[in-house]
Image (tube, helix red, strand yellow):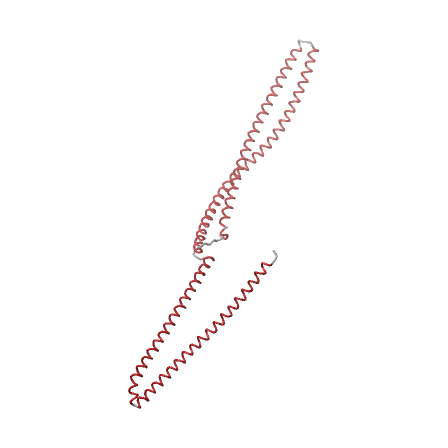
Amino acid sequence: MGSSLDGSGYGLPRDLGSQDQMQNEFLLRDIEVREITLQKLEAEVNRRNLSLCKLRSASIELDRKKADLFNEIQVSREKLKNEDLQGAVERLKSMLGVLKDLEKCESDFQSSCKQQCANMQVELVDIEKGISDTDRNKVDDSFLVRSIADAHDKLNSAKRELGAKRRAILSLKRQLDDVPVQSELIQYEHQFSGLYVHIQERLQQTRQYYDTYNALLEMKELMLKELSLLNSISSQFQEAIVDTTGRLKLMDSMEAILKGTQQKLKKVEAGLHAEQKIRDSLEEEYSAAVTEHRRFSSFLKASQRLGTQAPI
């Protein structure tokens, strides 16, 4: 016995488990992304701090060069007292030009440093804000952890419910396996039909045996009655010949026997007439069945001829 069951009606726990699992995976990915973002922000802060250190070092180096230049100018002024005025003026002009260039470079460098410092301050503010947001997200992570724990509890509950429903489904499947399928019912029908035909044949044989037994029993009774009658006639015949009264009694008994025999004969003839009627009706049914069979046979042959003559 085999049967199948569509468990489409028990899909809710499976959908709930998949949704909880997807939510858990999404939360874990969100936490990983936030951690990676925090690491990037920390690396950016370190890089900006390193840039500030480099800018401070460059500013100190420019201040040192400026101080060296002023010292050189001071030394040059002292040398002017002992050297030619024209050459000193030329050197002084060149030094002043160099000084102006250095001051311009210093001014540009300072403005650039200020701009970079302002940009870095803005970026630091943004980074600190991102870090604070990350801290708040860390605070929210505890809520996410609790949500994940609740989701796991719901998932376990759904799994338990799914297990109970699966056990119920298996029980129903076992019950359905005990029910015969269409092919088995057809097989049972054929077997019962064959058994019914066999029982009818045995019943017909049994009826024939009973009819034969009853006929033989009736023949036995008739033969016994006939024998008894012959014995009675034989015993009364000698007395009936001698006495007139005996002859009358013998004649009365013979008439009674004749009436009984006639009644029995009428009864047998009535039974024979009923059996003949049944036989005639069966013969008529048989003739009608034979005629119908011939008609269907001719119709089948005509259909086959038309089928063979039809164009392909």
Q: Position of residue 41 (x, y in %)?
A: 55, 33
| Of residues 79 and 299, the one drawn nearer to the viewer in this rendering | 299
| Of residues 158 and 182, the one drawn nearer to the viewer in this rendering | 182
Quadrant location of residue 267? bottom left
Q: Is residue 175 left or right of residue 60?
A: left
Quadrant where the C terminus is found in the figure: bottom right
**Compared with residue 110, is residue 155 higher up or lower down, i.e. above or below?**
below
Q: Is residue 12 left or right of residue 242?
A: right
Marks counted in the figure total: 0
**Compared with residue 122, is residue 70 higher up or lower down, i.e. above or below?**
above
Quadrant where the N terminus is found in the figure: bottom left
| Of residues 135 and 25, the one drawn nearer to the viewer in this rendering | 25
Q: Position of residue 186 (x, y in %)?
A: 46, 59
Quadrant location of residue 242? bottom left
Q: Is residue 290 left or right of residue 67?
A: left
Q: Position of residue 303 (x, y in %)?
A: 57, 62
Quadrant location of residue 118? top right
**Compared with residue 31, is residue 87 higher up or lower down, i.e. above or below?**
above
Q: Position of residue 128 (x, y in %)?
A: 56, 34
Q: Residue furthest bottom?
A: 244
